[in-house]
Every structure is written in structure tokens, then in C-alpha cells.
Amino acid sequence: MPTDSRRLPVPEVSHSPELFCSSDPTSLINDDSLRKDGRNPEEIAGIFMQCGTVSQAKGSSFCELHKTKVICSVYGPKDVEQKEDFQMIGKLKCDFKFAPFSCHKRRGHIADLEESELCEVLTQALSSSVCLHRYPKSQIEVYVIVLENNGSALAAAITAASLALADACIEQYDIVAAASVRVFGKENFLRDPTFHEEYFPHQLSKKNDFNNGVVTVALMPTLNQVCGVLSEGCMESSVLQEAIQTCTEEAQNLYAPLRKCLTSNLGDINV
Amino acid sequence: MDAVVGQVCIPGERLSSVELCQAGPGTYVRQGYVFASLAGLVAKEREKSSDLPLVSVKSKNKAQSVPEIGAIVTCKITQITSRFAKCHIIAVNNKTLSMPFRGMIRKENVRETDRDRVEIYKCFRPGDIALAKVLSLGDASCYLLTTAENELGVVVAHSDEGVALIPLSHNEMQCPKSFVKENRKVARPQSEHLAFPER
């Protein structure tokens, strides 16, 4: 693109001002055993859910988990593309994307490796709940966009996707609720971690205790079945078990707000 | 335990046991109980054929059905060849679909009599709206449809000038403007839709 010679040239490379801030060495829990945002370690984040936000889509939902905002649209069941093989069960196509402006560091427009991995976990969790055998030769498309990432984006995405599928009147065995927990040390579990509390591989841990990581669990509350688990980091098996148990309990507690969101969305229907 | 009619339910809620009710659309059976699979209102219908009532979940109008074998579909013819006519399925059992599915009517499935000597050009033209029945799921590219019944066939067709054709018989339609007769495989109008002038 030819540039205007009368303009002052801008620097070709720009850096985020956060790079030049001194890194915060404070620990995750301070002396009053409170987290950075003032919550207790066991305190869950405030949640807001709403269905029917995207008018063009068959079904949609918006989910807010503390400051993390996720929007999901569902299209289908529609005809499979020409090149796909014949299948008696339907196909579920998920797309997970962080919006370029959502994270601290600007993300590209094309899905990178992290987004592909989270998309895989999302697909896994939803495939267990959607009655795909009732939609032969069709595909259902689920698009999830994270508008603001302040931690627990995957958990919010799975919950939002399940709500959107219910809003689109796609048959499911059960709605899926997801929750995540940050593990550091044997006894420290932080529920619904924020972005600064999420696990980064380069963080140092205490000398004797190498337990450090993040666990996300997707659960079907009524059937009490876990349909997806993602665990990042290094943990002993007993710590991992306890973390999964904590996430499962938290996901169970999400059932009541999920139900309220869906029933209030139904409004008045004529039978 | 039994679900109350008109009660709001979400996917995964237990509605009733198999001994009390039959599972209808919008529900599934697991371990001897009927669960809801859609978010909506519970409805119960008493079927004459069986003793047990049929429990189903009625959701907003959005619930879209996928073409099933034996369903009557409304389709729009998109292309014709000497052996088949390809179409877009736009509605299933009178419920419009948000995205059309692809269907195909083969030469031997157009009518019941004289199946081999059918000329597709004299039965369908691109742009016609026709009623058909789903024969089978077909292959990856399209559903297989049939119009081999009196009530199935072309319902709406336009002439070259763009005027709607008027059906004359089971294989003829006439343009009211130019009075040109065109050949189509016409669907027989059902008796409840016919209005006769009072004498």
C-alpha cells in the first residue's frame, strides 16, 4: 500500500505497555488468605447467562463468568457438505475463537494451537450430550467467541454452548455445566481462576510441592456424568482427583442458575 | 412420579416412568424412565391405539425436523437431466426449514404407471414447487424422493413469461395469459381444498 510521504512514519513494530511493567511477585493468596480480587479461595465467581442474544442464529447464548464474556451461536441441523461421507449420525462442528481484542496480548484472526485444543475439548464435551443419532446426514454448527478473557474461558464456553444448543431446540441428553479450578500446592484450590491466577508453565512453584496446574471439568448435572476434562500442569494423582471432585461439585451448583436461565427464556408458549 | 402437563422442563429432567407414559417427541428413555431432551412445556396426549398416554415436550417453533423416511416434503426443483431431477427440500411436513436439504427424484420414481418411459422434461422444470415423499436417506449428496402417488407432484409452476400455470389434468398445466399447455406431473388437489361455485 503506498504510504503518504507527508505523513510522519510510525514505528513498524509496537509493544504492549504491560511488557515494561515490573512483574508482580506477590503470591496468589495474601496474608488474609484472600485472592487478588478479594475472593476467598472457595468463593465462586459471579455468573450471568442469557439466551437468544444473536438474532440471526438458530440458537444463541451469552455467558459472563466474573469478567470473562463468551458468546455462542448455534446453526443447524443443516445438510452436510458435499465432500463429506454418508453418516447415519449427525456431525457436530465446533469453532472456538478468542476475539483479537479479548486477551492481554492481541491474538491473530486465524485460530492458533491453543484455540484448536480448546475447541477439541469443547467438541468432546458436547458430543456426549447432543442426541446426534436423531439428526442423520446433518451437521450442527456451534460457534463460540470469547469477547473478554479473564480466566476460565473454556468453562464459560462449554456452559454457553450447551445453553445455545438448548435455545436452538437441538435434542440433548442433558445440559452441560463446566467449572475450573487452579491448583497450586497440595491443599490450595482456587475456584474459577481469573486470568492472573491461571497456570503458566514458566511460573515457579514451592520447592517441595510441585503441584501446579489448572483443571477444567464439564459435567452433565442430572445424569451426574463427566463428559470432558482438561488438565494442564503438573499434579499428583491424588491432587488431580481432588481437583476433579471440586470442579464436579461446582458444576453441580451451576444447575439451578442454568435451569432458571432456560425457563425464563421460554416465556409463554402455546401448547 | 409423573410430570404435570404444562410444566416447564429443560433437557435432562426426569418426566415420568416408562410404566406410566410412553416417550414421544422431545424425550428419551433411560433406565426405565422418560427424560426430556428439549427445553419447553410438557404435553400429554392419549393415543387411541395404546393404553399409555404419550408424553412429549413442546418447544418454541424453532424445533426443526430432519427429513425422515415417509415424510411429505415440499421441494423446489433446481436442475433436471434425462435420468433424474435434483431439488432443494424447503419444508418437511409443512414446517419450513431454515436451511434447505438436497434431494433427488429419479426417473423411475416419478409416477406409478409406465415408469421406464418417463421424460423428466415433461414432468418437472427448474423452479417448480413440488410435493414429494422421502423414499430413503439416499447417499451423502442427497435424499431420495418419490412423486409416485396421485397427491404428489408439481403444485406451483410458472410459464416462460413468469405467469403461474393453472392445472388442467394429471399431466397438463396451462398458462392463463398465452393459453400454451405445458406438461408436468401435477399433484391432485385434496378434496378439502377444492371449492366449488354454488349453483
Image (spheres, rainbow, N blue to C red):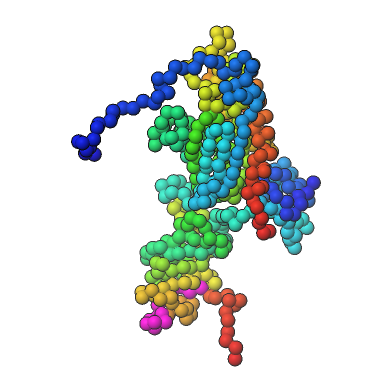
Pinpoint residue B58: horizontal percent, then vertical percent.
66, 55
> Residue A232 magenta-drawn?
no
The one of A24 and B190 positioned closer to us in this rendering: A24
Q: Identify the residue at image location x=44%, y=53%.
A: B141
Q: Identify the residue at image location x=58%, y=38%.
A: A159
Pinpoint residue B4: horizontal percent, then vertical percent.
76, 52
Q: Identify the residue at image location x=50%, y=56%.
A: B98
Q: Where are the magenta residues, as a range?
A: B175-187
Q: Main secondary structure of the magenta part?
A: loop
Pinpoint residue B170: horizontal percent, then vertical percent.
49, 77
Residue sitting farthest toward the left: A5
Residue sitting farthest toward the bottom: B199
Relative height, residue B65 to residue A15 (above, below): below
Q: Is residue B118 visible in this depiction of the protein?
A: no
Pinpoint residue B175: horizontal percent, then vertical percent.
41, 80
Whether residue A127 sits left or right of residue B118 in the image: it is right
Whether residue B119 sits left or right of residue B13 in the image: it is left
Q: Identify the residue at image location x=47%, y=78%.
A: B167
The one of A19 and A157 positioned closer to us in this rendering: A19
> Residue B177 magenta-drawn?
yes
Whether residue B85 sits left or right of residue A173 in the image: it is left
